[in-house]
Image (cartoon, helix red, strand yellow):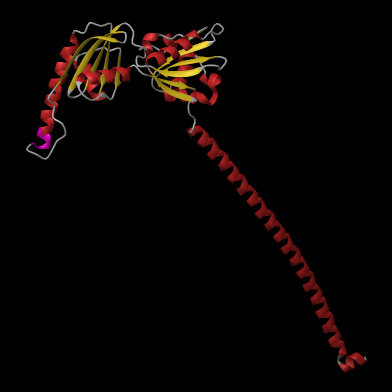
Amino acid sequence: MLDELLGRASLKERIDELEEENERLQNRYEAESERRAEATTAKQEAEAEVNRLEDRIAQLEGELERLEDEETTLEPRHRDRLRGARLAEVIDRLASFRTAPEGALTAVLEDGDAVETLREESDVDLGTLLGDRAALVDDAAPCVLCVDDAGLVAVALEPPALPDADLEAHTTWGDRFALEREWFLPTGRYALALVRTDLFALGRYDGDERIDYRGFESDVKGSHSKGGFSQARFERIRDDQIDAHLERCADAVADVDADRLFVVGQRGVVDALVAEADLEPAATAAVDATGDPKPALEDAHRSFWTTTLRVL
């Protein structure tokens, strides 16, 4: 009664209401603080997971880059260009190799996807024999491949006179490598013709010895200048001169008395001469032989009878 008279009853009720509101707000604050703590923890965990994944991605990218570098830098263990006595010695060493029956593979591989072709046409899986280094065989083709089943020998030779035959006939397993010296070395009686746009030289040989020679140069215009000829007229005159030169070259090789004919020189001119004279050479090659006909022929002969050796 006294509280009501003094107005304290309403104050007490207001105090109770405020205390209830305060408690409710305190509970809300505590709940919100807990949620924020949980959110902060979840955020920290998510950031840690992101960092872990970024580190893993960087690691995988590094491994990928390393593998790509290893793939692009895969090189033969040894590479050399051989001719003459040194080449003969290497061929003799390979020919002397002996293994169990069907333990030595000799394969003559043309241009193109040599590894896949060998697998499809001869049922030979070079990946089993060479592992990742089988990719080097495609880089070496055209070549003669010699590999034994124990992995002791794995070489690719790029000879001047690669035999022109089907793959199956020149893919053999034996107790030794099936190499023909005439693929690599000058043997028997043969002729070597060197042809450029303005030069021709022909030698007949018995082995490494030249027994006959013929050579000449033709008057063929060089680079066009800004003189009296127009470009079109200059090109017509030059083409006519080259055609006349090729006719002389075709006449020179028409009656060659040799078991084999090799034609070397500027690639486009070599192909034109072969077509012009309807030749069937044992091999053709692009060689860089300059100078007068006779010394140029000597350079061409030496360059042609050179074999590239790759130790895989």
Q: In this view, does 54 lie to the left or right of 26?
A: left
Q: Residue at x 67, y 58 (%)?
A: 43
Q: Position of residue 40 (x, y in %)?
A: 70, 61
Q: Residue at x 62, y 45 (%)?
A: 56
Q: Which residue is drawn at 27% across and 9% down?
A: 205
Q: Residue at x 50, y 25 (%)?
A: 77
Q: Is the magenta stretch mostly helix, strand or loop?
A: helix
Q: Is residue 107 left or right of residue 274?
A: right
Question: Is residue 69 or residue 186 the one in the foreground?
Answer: 186
**Which region of the structure is painted magenta?**
229-233
Q: Position of residue 4 (x, y in %)?
A: 89, 91
Q: Position of residue 95 (x, y in %)?
A: 47, 9
Q: Is residue 193 left or right of residue 51?
A: left
Residue 227 in the magenta stretch? The answer is: no
Question: Is residue 97 or residue 208 the one in the foreground?
Answer: 208
Hey, which residue is sitting farthest left in the picture? 228
Quarter holding residue 169: top left
Hey, which residue is sitting farthest bottom in the picture? 5
Q: Position of residue 109 (x, y in %)?
A: 42, 17
Q: Quadrant of the N terminus?
A: bottom right
Question: Is residue 261 or residue 41 the one in the foreground?
Answer: 261
Q: Is residue 181 above or below residue 10?
A: above
